[in-house]
Image (cartoon, rainbow, N blue to C red):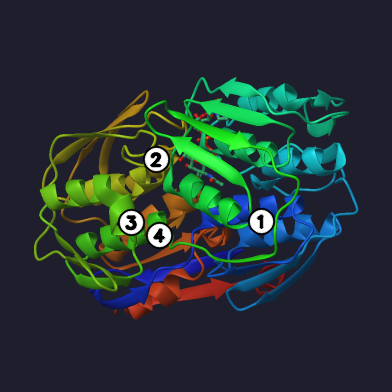
Amino acid sequence: MGSIKVVGGGRINGKVVIQGSKNLAIPCLCSSVLFDKPIHFKNVPMISDVFESTNILECLGGRVKCIENEIDIFPEIKEVGKACLGCGGRSTILYCGPLLAKTGRCSFRYPGGCHIGKRPIDIHERILEAFGAQKNSDEDKLEYTADSWKGCEVSLPIRSVGATETGILSAILAKGTTIINYPAIEPEIMHLCEFLNSAGASIVYEEDRDRFVIDGVTGLQETTYKLAADRIVAGTYMIYTCMCKGHAILIDAPYCELESLIELLRSFGAFIRRIPEGMEIYMNKRPYCSGKVETKYYPGFPTDLQSLILTLAGISNGELLIRENIFESRFETAYEFMKMGANVQITGDSARVIGTEYLENTKLTVPDLRGGAALLGAMLCGNGEGELKNIELIKRGYEDIVRDLKRLGYDGLEEMWNLKRKENL
Ligand code: EPU
């Protein structure tokens, strides 16, 4: 198990390059099953969720060559998956559509992912069945076959990111046209479409009709694609800068994808501007929080930044009401945060956070990926020394958060590993 030792009270004053996007890398890797030709991805974040996905690809017969932040994939899919495939992340469900389209079969473990809610996959399953999949398994496995794979029209009851991706990935090689009504339009989905279209797919987003229209094609071309920067990682470092009353240059930060956060942080007192290399953020006083924030699908406030805003509000001069509308267990972070002396009152899907000036660093355990980043932020401004345990969960999405904080000028962090565990990451 890994942990980070934190000495609180440091400053942020520096520059960091924002890594490539996790939630874009995952569907891009899954889409490689659709290709017969090599794909070259650049700016891939070196995180455990990506390694899990490339491991699955290798088990399916694909060849994967990874050098620094670049990954070459030679698809050559021979297997259809095994029930044992998948080890806790969300990738397996996104591999199903492409595998069924390509081979007519798939067999995986039920997907996992962070424990932030129940995370059912009923909408994905309905979409796969609309294309022609037949389920052959019990509830713990994803085992499907398909005799034919045809375009269809589906309407999403919730704007699910993953289900929209399942629809898009399933449609690329399907016979005929697919229409996905009421889709999620998170930037990662738009980038995924841009990548697939650059390889010969035919995906059109009709904003006025709130739908994707996808004409099936017979194959995809060899392609090179540079992944966009991770808006949630950029948002994390923006929030850290506000917490530590610092100044940061975030190279490649996707300003246009972060409007809801920028507006909120400005209302808390931050100075933020777009610069040619990315974004500059500056905070010269303790943040002042007031009002209400609620999470919503894009372009609303992202659920992945909710825990970070909660800890920011917890150290602020003011009070914030937070409502979580997407995942029902995101407030686990708040219970850990309260061990530092934070004042958070939780009622159902809402949390009332009353800012506290002095929080004590102590031993905390990471509950989930973004919750871990949020607790680390709180500890940067806590008093004294503390330890954040179970940081494997942070490694699922942040390439090297301690390295990045050092680049941002924060001294006082040390990553500690039980070496046996580190070899397995
Ligand atoms: N939902 C269903 N049935 C389904 C699918 C989703 O009820 O079949 C519900 C979920 O339970 C949730 C809501 O729909 O209440 C939205 O979930 P969504 O499907 O949009 O989430 P996801 O695809 O599982 C992705 C990101 C998450 C991010 C959410 C929301 C990836 C790999 N994961 O998850 O990222 O929070 O969209 O934006 O893209 C993270 O990066 O830390 C993370 C959890």
Q: Amino acid at mark 3?
A: Gly
Instruction: Using the numbered discs, state the Cα–Cα distance from disc 1 to disc 3 in whole angstroms.
Output: 24 Å
Earlier in the chain: of badge 1 and badge 3, it is 1
- Taking the spot 56% from the left edge, 40% from the top edge, the residue there is 115
Ligand 1 neighbours mark 3 (CB distance < 8 Å): no
Quadrant in the picture for the C terminus:
bottom right
Name the image quarter holding residue 77: bottom right
Earlier in the chain: of badge 3 and badge 2, it is 3
| Picture coordinates of residue 134, whole percent (x, y) | 83, 24
Q: Amino acid at mark 2?
A: Thr
Q: Amino acid at mark 4?
A: Val
Label number found at residue 77: none
Front in this rendered view, residue 5 or 163: 163
Instruction: Using the numbered discs, state the Cα–Cα distance from disc 4 to disc 1 in whole angstroms.
Output: 20 Å
Earlier in the chain: of badge 4 and badge 2, it is 4
Earlier in the chain: of badge 4 and badge 1, it is 1
Q: Amino acid at mark 1?
A: Leu
Q: Are marks 4 and 3 in contact (CB under 8 Å)?
A: yes
